[in-house]
Image: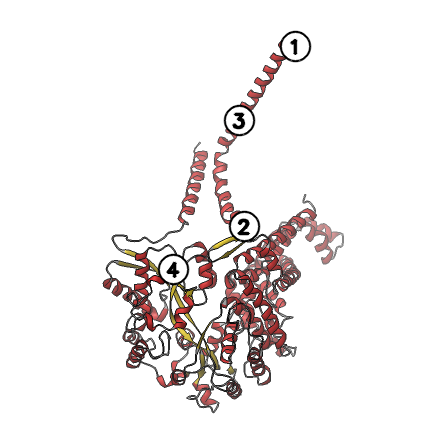
């Protein structure tokens, strides 16, 4: 008798447990005014392992200091992995409505966020009373968070691409590391000399997979005065002389000069791994990649310098800029939106504190002095204050970044549907870097057809 | 009179029907009560399937007929299917997936069986050899594929090219060559997955009565004839099941192109149907298109499975 009863109880217990499990899967949202406080969740803190845990400790100190300043606000931090915007996770969170109240995204994510109806309109809150330096924030940082005149987030951690060089390899190749090449023609010449060092050294390395190839194609196209899409954003605009020049230049370096190595289909960590191993002479990148080489790929700051984005027989016409955005989840109360803005202002938009607390960063051994992030309008007081604080606390050789800082290039934002366009352009980049007989005109025509189809669907 | 004669009969018939209905209801009730335990256990599995298998399939089909823009979802009929059909990578994705499946059947299906037959002949160290054969399965797929990435380095630094070079054979560009991309994926996939198949085949082989082989030997059958006339017929059921599972699994090719070839490879040389779905869903913000492609794959695999089951000889 006992056995059937036991079975029945077990069966009922399983059903109950399943029911509980499923109910536990339901969405949990943070509450407003819990214990008289306005509570918000914020994602993308540093990882426990970053800089031996010091970065996360600094973040937690910032949260504590902020809450002390704002006793009516409680910040709850949510970790979303080392790459805060890993596309599958990010999309899943948006579709499931489980993103944090103030959630991290790339500057190219606005369309996806709006299509998922995931962000609140915070336009009316964005003013100099809530963000004292709002008017000093660069348009290239603000624009990617706005659509039809409405803001859904706050841009920060802006970057602009340049040419990163390995000083040690430059010197070994008889080149002057204080003068990075400023034209694509010089890049090709220098890359050939660096590759001649042998021992697996690549003169110039380039991405061609995982959407990063298209990303760099666009950056190099901008530098030659081109544009990925037409001004109305409805047609592809790269199937022209500038687009062909980008691909032809890379194809020549790869197969005529043999200065780009044989290993291709590289994605973001692949190139930086090679760079960290001291095998890459030059690559296109933003200053933050130098930090990544050192903190993630065992490189040395003293080996690296950065110059402006090269141009075609002269200075670059423009360089690609991007960065990060904190979006605000749809459905937040006005008090929560204000609390979120206050936090972003504290952590990311105020020189001297949060990510700009260089005194703290220097004491933690974090490099201070890299020309990033690029948030402020050139000539603004905010930029001057930030630069002064950097200079006062730097632990780097600032001369390494002088060519980049002293030769600013006009920043051009990424195209609409950027990631989808980059995915298409990966095919052209991978072909010119792996196929000696690549037909550049055909590659661009195919990519143009795909991008036009893609853009026509997004309405 | 007619009425008086008919009425009792009709009344009797109605009573009988009512009694039968009561009896049926009572029987059903009793059955439900009797099987409460069984239903209790079953409901967990049914709910799991319903929430995690059937609902997503239905939801996917619904999504494949919708388009969402700025939070507004509209019904678009078959437009997503038409659009996906005209995606320039669509044909390449199906072609690569079919080519991979075919090669995976030739190598990934037959090789484990051959190895299992050979292992089954060993009288000593069989446990050790089984463990060695199964080891690659214990490696997380991402780790195993990262090892293959290094092995496929197109310079002589890659172990495969180093070996080919040492043997004075022509080297390969592996995943950087349009022709070699899919075979490269098959080699890695076969190495990663065959351990599990070998164990299943070995279990089936060890269930074959030894008398059958003895009789075949007495009849003078060679090794090949023994395999053909004894081993294969005796493992037909498991071979048939593994064939179906192999096709369904290989058609869902994803992680190999993603890690070994950056997803698409050279001009879609590695793009698979599932990778194209991933591209649409997560890189192009096109959930409707991805869902349409998912439904297409579901229909193809369900159709294949149904056809295969129908054509397969009935087991004894």
Query: Hey, which quadrant is residue A426 in on the image?
Result: bottom right
Residue A177, quarter of picture? bottom left
Regarding mark 1 in the picture, which secondary structure is present there?
Answer: helix
Q: Nearer the viewer, mark 3 or mark 2?
A: 2
> Which structural element holds mark 3?
helix
Gap between marks 1 and 3, in whole Å?
34 Å
Residue on which the image places disc 2: B62
Residue found farthest to the bottom: A174
Q: CA distance from mark 4 to mark 2?
A: 29 Å
The image shows residue A372 at horizontal and vertical percentages of: 37, 76
Q: Is label 3 in contact with label 2 (beta carbons under 8 Å)?
A: no
Q: Position of residue A15 (x, y in %)?
A: 44, 41
Tell which subunit mark 3 falls on.
Answer: B
Give residue A451's position: percent from left, percent from top. 56, 68
Secondary structure state at the residue bearing disc 2: helix
Q: Which residue is mark 4?
A: A121
Residue B15, relative to residue A230: is it above or below? above
Bin the neighbour count of mark 2 within 10 Å (Cα to Cα): few under 14, some 14-19, many 20 and up: some
Q: Chain of mark 1?
A: B
- Name, please, the residue furthest toward the right: B219
Residue placed at 44% from the left, 81% from the top?
Answer: A164
Q: Earlier in the sequence, mark 2 or mark 1?
A: 1
- N-terminal of the two: label 1 or label 3? 1
Q: Chain of mark 2?
A: B
Left/right of residue A190 with respect to residue A126 in the rendered view: right
When the figure is inspected, residue A25 is found, relative to residue A374, above or below; the finding is: above
Query: Is residue A225 or residue B211 the one in the foreground?
Result: A225
Which of the two discs, 4 and 2, sits closer to the camera? 4
Residue underneath mark 3: B25
Q: Which residue is mark 1?
A: B2
């Amino acid at each position: 008798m006992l056995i059937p009863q036991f079975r029945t109880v077990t069966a009922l217990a399983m059903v109950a447990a399943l029911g509980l499990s499923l109910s536990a899967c339901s969405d949990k949202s943070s509450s407003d005014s819990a214990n008289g406080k306005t509570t918000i969740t914020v994602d993308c803190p540093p990882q426990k392992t970053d800089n031996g845990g010091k970065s996360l400790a600094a973040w937690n100190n910032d949260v504590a200091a902020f809450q002390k300043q704002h006793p009516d606000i409680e910040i709850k931090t949510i970790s979303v992995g080392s790459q805060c915007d890993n596309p599958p996770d990010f999309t899943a969170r948006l579709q499931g409505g489980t993103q944090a109240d103030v959630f991290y995204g790339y500057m190219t994510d606005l369309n996806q966020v709006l299509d998922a109806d995931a962000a609140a309109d915070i336009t009316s809150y964005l003013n100099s009373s809530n963000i004292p330096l709002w008017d000093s924030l660069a348009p290239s940082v603000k624009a990617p968070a706005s659509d039809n005149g409405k803001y859904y987030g706050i841009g920060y951690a802006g970057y602009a691409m340049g040419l990163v060089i390995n000083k040690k390899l430059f010197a070994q190749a008889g080149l002057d590391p204080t003068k990075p090449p400023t034209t694509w023609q010089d890049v090709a010449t220098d890359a050939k000399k660096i590759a001649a060092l042998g021992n697996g050294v690549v003169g110039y390395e380039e991405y061609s997979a995982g959407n990063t190839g298209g990303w760099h194609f666009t950056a190099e196209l901008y530098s030659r005065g081109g544009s990925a899409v037409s001004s109305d954003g409805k047609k592809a605009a790269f199937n022209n002389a500038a687009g062909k020049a980008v691909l032809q230049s890379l194809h020549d370096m790869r197969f005529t000069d043999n200065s780009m190595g044989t290993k291709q289909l590289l994605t973001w960590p692949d190139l930086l791994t090679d760079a960290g191993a001291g095998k890459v002479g030059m690559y296109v990148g933003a200053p933050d990649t130098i930090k990544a080489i050192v903190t993630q790929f065992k490189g040395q700051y003293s080996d690296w310098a950065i110059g402006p984005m090269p141009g075609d027989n002269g200075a670059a016409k423009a360089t690609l800029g991007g960065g990060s955005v904190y979006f605000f989840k749809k459905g937040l109360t006005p008090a929560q939106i204000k609390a979120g803005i206050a936090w972003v202002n504290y952590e990311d938009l105020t020189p001297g504190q949060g990510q700009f607390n260089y005194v703290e960063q220097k004491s933690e051994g974090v490099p201070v002095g890299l020309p990033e992030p690029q948030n402020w309008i050139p000539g603004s007081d905010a930029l001057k204050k930030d630069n002064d604080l950097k200079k006062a606390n730097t632990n780097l050789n600032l001369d390494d970044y002088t060519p980049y800082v002293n030769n600013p290039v006009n920043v051009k934002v990424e195209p609409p549907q950027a990631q989808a366009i980059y995915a298409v352009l990966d095919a052209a980049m991978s072909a010119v870097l792996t196929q000696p007989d690549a037909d550049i005109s055909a590659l661009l025509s195919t990519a143009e057809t795909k991008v036009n189809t893609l853009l026509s669907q997004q309405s | 009179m007619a009425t008086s004669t008919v009425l009792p009969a009709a009344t009797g018939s109605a009573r009988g029907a009512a009694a039968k209905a009561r009896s049926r209801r009572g029987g059903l009730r009793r059955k439900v009560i009797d099987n409460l335990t069984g239903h209790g256990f079953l409901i967990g599995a049914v709910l799991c399937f319903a929430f995690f298998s059937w609902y997503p399939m239905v939801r996917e089909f619904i999504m494949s007929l919708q388009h969402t823009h700025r939070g507004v979802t509209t019904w678009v009929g078959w437009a997503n299917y038409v659009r996906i059909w005209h995606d320039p990578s669509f044909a390449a994705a199906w072609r690569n997936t079919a080519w991979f499946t075919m090669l995976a059947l030739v190598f990934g299906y037959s090789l484990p069986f051959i190895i299992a037959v050979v292992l089954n002949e060993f009288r000593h160290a069989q446990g050790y050899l089984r463990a060695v054969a199964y080891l690659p399965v214990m490696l997380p797929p991402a780790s195993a594929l990262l090892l293959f990435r290094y092995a496929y380095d197109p310079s002589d630094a890659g172990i495969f090219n180093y070996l080919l070079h040492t043997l004075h054979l022509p080297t390969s560009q592996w995943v950087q060559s349009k022709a070699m991309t899919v075979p490269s994926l098959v080699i890695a996939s076969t190495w990663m997955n065959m351990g599990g198949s070998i164990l299943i085949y070995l279990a089936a082989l060890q269930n074959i009565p030894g008398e059958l082989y003895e009789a075949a030997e007495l009849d003078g059958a060679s090794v090949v004839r023994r395999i053909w006339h004894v081993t294969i017929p005796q493992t037909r059921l498991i071979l048939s099941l593994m064939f179906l599972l192999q096709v369904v699994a290989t058609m869902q090719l994803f992680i190999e192109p993603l890690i070994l070839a950056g997803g698409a490879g050279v001009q879609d040389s590695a793009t698979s149907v599932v990778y194209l779905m991933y591209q649409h869903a997560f890189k192009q913000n096109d959930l409707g298109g991805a869902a349409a492609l998912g439904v297409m794959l579901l229909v193809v695999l369900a159709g294949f499975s149904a056809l295969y089951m129908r054509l397969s000889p009935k087991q004894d």
